[in-house]
Amino acid sequence: MTTPFWTVLIAILIPFFLALLNDLLRFRQFGVFDNNHPREQTAKLTGLGARVWAAQQNAWEALIMYIPSVLIAHIAGADPVQSTYAAIVFCIARISHSTFYLLDFSTLRSASYFVALACCLRFFWLAANA
């Protein structure tokens, strides 16, 4: 399996990690874990809990662009070394994005978002030039 494919797995695991953290913060903030209405309870989170929820949602959304871009580059026969670089930078950017979300560093969070987006566009560029 190629490095870009491994990074797809990493990218998929990020929102699951954030979901676990969200659950812990829900329990900490409310003292009870409402498994019957988890989205309603999550909507009431404040501070760090609310930022974790937002980071989780953004992590899911990032997969919509990342997975197809990796697959298209692979199918097109894009340069594997350049694809590996783009994949690693994407993962670093997405992990940074979540971290900056949790720390409430909005400017750095936005910058890391655009770096990850640029990596996805890089995959398409590599595919187009394969």
Image (tube, rainbow, N blue to C red):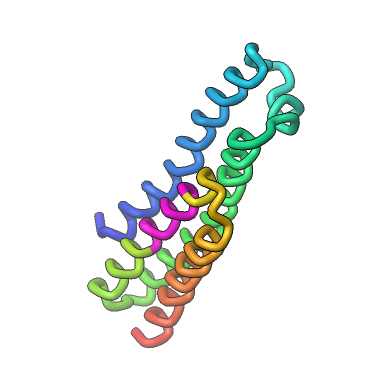
Q: Is residue 129 above or below residue 86?
A: below
**Does the magenta-highlighted stretch encompass residue 59?**
no
Q: Residue at x 56, y 62 (%)?
A: 107
Q: What stretch is highlighted in magenta?
A: 90-99
Occupied quadrant, residue 70: bottom left
Q: Residue furthest top?
A: 32
**Does the magenta-highlighted stretch encompass residue 95?**
yes
Q: Residue at x 41, y 51 (%)?
A: 95
Q: Position of residue 116 (x, y in %)?
A: 46, 65
Q: Is residue 3 above or below residue 127?
A: above
Our reading of the magenta stretch's main secondary structure is: helix
* Viewer-side residue, 117 vs 63: 117
Q: Residue furthest bottom?
A: 129
* Viewer-side residue, 126 vs 72: 126
Specify the quadrant that holds the N terminus: bottom left
Q: Is residue 124 above or below residue 109?
A: below
Q: Is residue 81 left or right of residue 116?
A: left
**How many labels sit on residues?**
0
Specify the quadrant that holds the C terminus: bottom left
Q: Where is residue 91 in the image (x, y as percent from the top left)?
A: 38, 56
Q: Position of residue 103 (x, y in %)?
A: 51, 45
Occupied quadrant, residue 38: top right
Occupied quadrant, residue 82: bottom left
Q: Which residue is drawn at 58% across and 57% down?
A: 106
Q: Where is residue 85 in the image (x, y as percent from the top left)?
A: 29, 69
